[in-house]
Image (cartoon, rainbow, N blue to C red):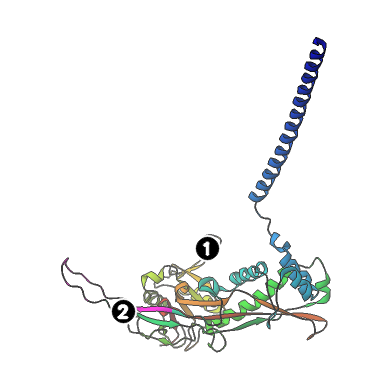
Amino acid sequence: MDIANETDTMAASFDLVARQDQAEKDISVLRSDVDEVKARIDKIGRAAARPAIEGAAKDSPEVKGFVDGYLRRGSETELKSISGMVQSEGGFAVPREIDAMIASELKEISPIRQLAQVVQVGSAGYRKLVTTGGTRSGWVSETSARLETEAPEFAEIAPPAGELYANPAASQGMLDDAGFDLEGWLANEIAMEFARAEGSAFVNGSGANQPLGFLSSPTSMAGDAVRPFGSVQYIGSGDANGFSTNPESGLIDLVHTMKAGHRQGASWLMNSSTLSEVRKLKTSDGAFLWQPGLVEGQPDRLLGYPVVEVEDMPDVAAGTFPIAFGNFKAGYLVTERSATQILRDPFTNKPFVHFYATKRVGGQVLDSAAIKLLKIEA
């Protein structure tokens, strides 16, 4: 009996040791799995915290399908299968990454777009209410009767809009070249054409299927208090053919016809020909009115305000408005649909492939008190 008991005890001991060894092995494997999971989590965390590589958005399936599938080869089926895009009458909507490239180029090229208030709209018509008169106010004692508050006066702004288009072309050889930066080239070409057409319309647009330019808006010599809503105030230069013998006085008067609140952020607008004349103007003591930017990147200044060159402004001539002074962020409104559409056309002008791009853009003077003009007249 004693030998049998000892045998059972030894067997139980060996079994316990084996179980302990297995448990230690299981714990070791579990720790290894936990360490592996932690390493993966740390790797994901580091990747998430890492700054995005410039141009990485171009590798998205939507962009690759649009550029390689549709723009290079004209494959609508591949584009639809990758990104789910649906063609409309005007073509396919440009992916937002490429549309952002176009918008960035537009802002860099078009000076009015840099200065004006730009809003994105989702429909063809956009309307905005502008307050033209405030409510009644006054001083009274604690127990005195208050006069009834009058309703504020409003005017409606509905900027005229039109379809802006560009139609750049590329040869099939360019499209077949894998090293050709198609999206960059296309964004630059569209932005250049859009900026050229926009710049002209924002200044001189007729308002018929295009924006109404601020120089095409009604003008008046009356001050802000009595001038009709929507009309832009101007003052004369003092000379029927150019600047007077005392140009500093006229330019100072132009600045101070604007309210102090609008003068914060105001700029001069003129073309390079007018700027060449302005740079020669001197005060009575011989000092130049124009001051160059002292630091690289800072704009040149006239009477302390930045000068922006806008080539669509007219030259100095009798009856023209060659100089504008204004806070265009408050004074001019640009409306646009956010999506640019592109239609690929390989048939009209063989062997070239045209990319017909369209975008709806509108514009109008928002607050005429924020824009002042100098007219060449006696």
Classified by dominant secondary structure, the portion drawn in magenta counts as loop
- The one nearer the camera, 24 or 1, is 1
| Residue hosting label 2 | 151
Quarter residue 239 falls in: bottom left
* Mark seen at residue 163: none
In this view, 64 is above or below 368: above
- Considering every residue shown, the one lying at the far top of the view is 2
Which residue lies at the image location 49% right of the left edge and 84% below the top edge?
215
Residue 161 location (% of width, % of height): 55, 83
Q: Which range is magenta?
A: 129-147
Of the residues tagged 2 and 1, which is closer to the observer?
A: 2
Magenta span has 252?
A: no
**Quarter occupied by the C terminus:** bottom left
Quarter residue 24 falls in: top right
Question: What type is the residue that disc 1 sits on?
Answer: Gln
In this view, 214 is above or below 17: below
Describe the element under mark 2 as helix, strand or loop.
loop
In this view, 44 is above or below 305: above
Magenta span has 137?
A: yes
Question: What type is the residue that disc 2 sits on?
Answer: Ala
* Mark seen at residue 298: 1
Which residue lies at the image location 40% right of the left edge and 71% below the top edge?
262
In whole angstroms, how far apart are the C-alphas of marks 2 and 1?
45 Å
Residue 165 location (% of width, % of height): 65, 82
- The one nearer the camera, 20 or 346, is 20
Check disc 1: other Cα within 10 Å, few if <14, some if 14-19, many if 20+. Answer: few
- Position of 307 compared to 77: left or right? left
Describe the element under mark 1 as helix, strand or loop.
loop
